[in-house]
């Protein structure tokens, strides 16, 4: 699947609780492979702009977001490249790496590469969790500018037993981050 070029406006999608017939996601794909999203502008988003669960071989490149809640949630995803993106006006996470039980089994999120990006949000810029049932290994982030992270610039959490390992950050510039780096291990009881 490829969406390349143009503009996608979240329009009437919801950011908070939804009722029957309403939507809160701009693009949601489950168990996809060979996905490409390039050169897209999102003037407004939704609760999620990109919610990908169980997806492999994903390219997200030159995406501009001007307003949304979450931008990219990678849940149980493998082999993902995010580059040359600019996310501003976000209310929550710009990029969240997660592993949950939505697909009926514990999976990993691994081999994620993020580079040459600019992120601004009211919460977390790069977030590991909060759903972390499976492991999250091999994450590489470099040449990233983070502005106005009102919670944290980088948040690494393990809340449901998953192991976060082999994570690398290089050439990260942060301004106005309440907590530049936040790390915690907890138990949220979200596992079956």
Image: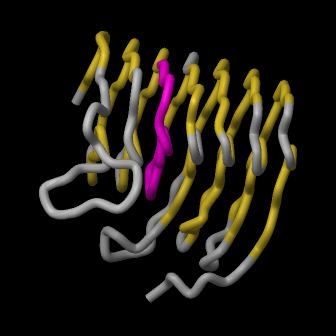
Which image quadrant is residue 128 in? bottom right
Is 77 situated left or right of 103 in this image? right
Q: Nearer the viewer, residue 103 or 149?
A: 149
Considering the whole magenta stretch, tell me its main secondary structure: strand
* Range covered by the magenta-colored residues: 64-78
Q: Residue at x 54, y 67 (%)?
A: 131
The spot of residue 153 in percent (x, y) is 77, 42
Q: Would residue 128 be counted in the magenta stretch?
A: no
Q: Residue at x 84, y 30 (%)?
A: 174
Pick the quarter of the image with the C terminus. bottom left
Q: In the rendered image of this protein, does residue 121 appear above or below residue 158?
A: above
Residue 29 shows in this picture = yes
Q: How many marks?
A: 0
Colouring: secondary structure
The spot of residue 6 in percent (x, y) is 29, 11
Q: Residue at x 62, y 31 (%)?
A: 114
Q: Nearer the viewer, residue 118 or 132?
A: 118
The spot of residue 49 in percent (x, y) is 39, 38
Is 51 situated left or right of 173 in this image? left
Residue 79 shows in this picture = no
The spot of residue 180 in percent (x, y) is 86, 44
Q: Residue at x 22, y 30 (%)?
A: 1
Q: Nearer the viewer, residue 164 or 71?
A: 71
Is 132 situated left or right of 50 in this image? right
Q: Would residue 66 be counted in the magenta stretch?
A: yes
Q: In the rendered image of this protein, does residue 37 appear above or below residue 139?
A: above
Q: Nearer the viewer, residue 12 or 120?
A: 12
């Amino acid at each position: 699947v490829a969406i390349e070029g143009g503009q996608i406006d979240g329009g009437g999608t919801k950011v908070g609780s939804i009722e029957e017939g309403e939507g809160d996601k701009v693009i949601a794909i489950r168990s996809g492979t060979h996905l490409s999203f390039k050169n897209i502008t999102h003037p407004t988003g939704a609760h999620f702009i990109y919610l990908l669960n169980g997806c492999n071989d994903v390219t997200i490149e030159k995406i501009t977001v001007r307003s949304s809640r979450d931008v990219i949630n990678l849940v149980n995803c493998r082999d993902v490249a995010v580059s040359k993106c600019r996310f501003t006006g976000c209310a929550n996470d710009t990029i969240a790496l997660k592993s949950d039980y939505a697909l009926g089994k514990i999976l990993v999120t691994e081999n994620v590469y993020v580079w040459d990006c600019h992120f601004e949000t009211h919460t977390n810029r790069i977030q590991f969790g909060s759903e972390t049932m499976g492991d999250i290994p091999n994450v590489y982030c470099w040449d990233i500018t983070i502005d106005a992270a009102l919670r944290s610039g980088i948040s690494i959490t393990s809340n449901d037993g998953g192991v976060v390992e082999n994570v690398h950050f290089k050439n990260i510039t942060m301004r106005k981050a309440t907590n530049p780096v936040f790390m915690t291990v907890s138990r949220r009881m979200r596992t079956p």
